[in-house]
Image (spheres, rainbow, N blue to C red):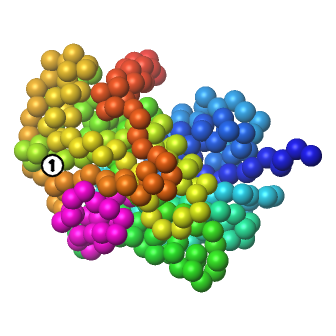
Amino acid sequence: MAERQKVSVITGAAGFIGSHLCDFLLARGHRVIGLDNLNTGTLRNLEHIDSPDFVYMNVDITDFIEIDGQVDYVYHMASPASPVDYLQIPLHTLKVGAVGTRNAIGLAKWKRARFLLASTSEVYGDPEVHPQSEDYWGNVNPIGPRSVYDEAKRYAETTTMAYQRQQGVDTRIIRIFNTYGPRMRPHDGRAVPTFIRQALEDKHLTVFGDGSQTRSFCYVSDLVEGIYRAMMSGYHFPVNLGNPAEYTIRKLAELIIEITGSKSDIIYQALPTDDPRRRRPDISLAKKLLDWEPTLKVEEGLTHTISWFKEYLAEEQLR
């Protein structure tokens, strides 16, 4: 007797990471139900999908979620994720982290499905421990402008653990560090898409502060593999997913200028409030638990991403 087809629900399916996760699960034979209200996502990220196993539903997850039939997995990816977004819609960002998480995990409970929360390295705030491991509780300013995202994700983690402990929901938590790749929005305010767009347009690359702050950049295909492995694991506590290779923002800008062959210069602007000085994941747990670590070097990933941006920006000019 053939095994029943697995059904995965993905919130935030039209977003950058969510859309890549749709592709990944469809390639593994899942039926995928993608939910998004297109607040920060776009149907352009899904228009390439031509599969009877994919269903898109325009759903705001801060409202009640109703899905017919069997569901095996719920991937809760939905949330504004860039400073441009969550500074413009702070109350909605909080609502997605609180009410949206409760609704998504409620769906998993109702369907007896496994639930995965996409949390973030932002729960560590401006860390006083480096690199950051899962047992570090973080250094977050609860009343700063970034806190609407940081604290929404911290609350979402708390909600997830409470449902696991008190309601018996089969949960997973991942903490995503900086991720990049095709389908990022050119104007979403994050370093990689901003620098690539500026370099391709031969504009000055705007670096905040003196550029000495560090980040760790993971290519999206590596991340999605880690997300899947985390969902298939038996581990309920948070797991860091990211690339431990650490770059200064200034070095990232220089690398993008080099790869694009741009004539751009780097200019410096004031550092935003509560911008983390250092960010690098300790992925020892992911290596041990999931047998996972990134495989694509940053230079190669940036080359793929720049190629995609060239095509995207060219299409935008024709629209």
SS assignment for the magenta stretch, majority? loop
User: Residue shown at 45%/34% (left/top)?
Assistant: 183
Left or right of 280, for residue 170: right
Left or right of 314, for residue 49 = right
Residue 121, quarter of the rendered image: bottom left
The residue lying toward the viewer, choosing from 83 and 32, is: 32
The vertical placement of 131 against 1, above or below, is below
Q: Position of residue 300 (x, y in %)?
A: 35, 26
Who's the residue at 25% across and 57% down the image?
131
Tag 1: amino acid: Gln
Residue 210, given in percent of the width and then of the height, sits at 7, 44
As drawn, 145 above or below 26? below
Give the residue number, with chain letter if any, for mark 1: 213
Q: Is residue 206 magenta?
A: no
Provide residue 88's location: percent of width, then percent of height. Answer: 33, 56
Segment colored magenta:
120-142
The answer to whether 170 appears left or right of 192 in the picture is right
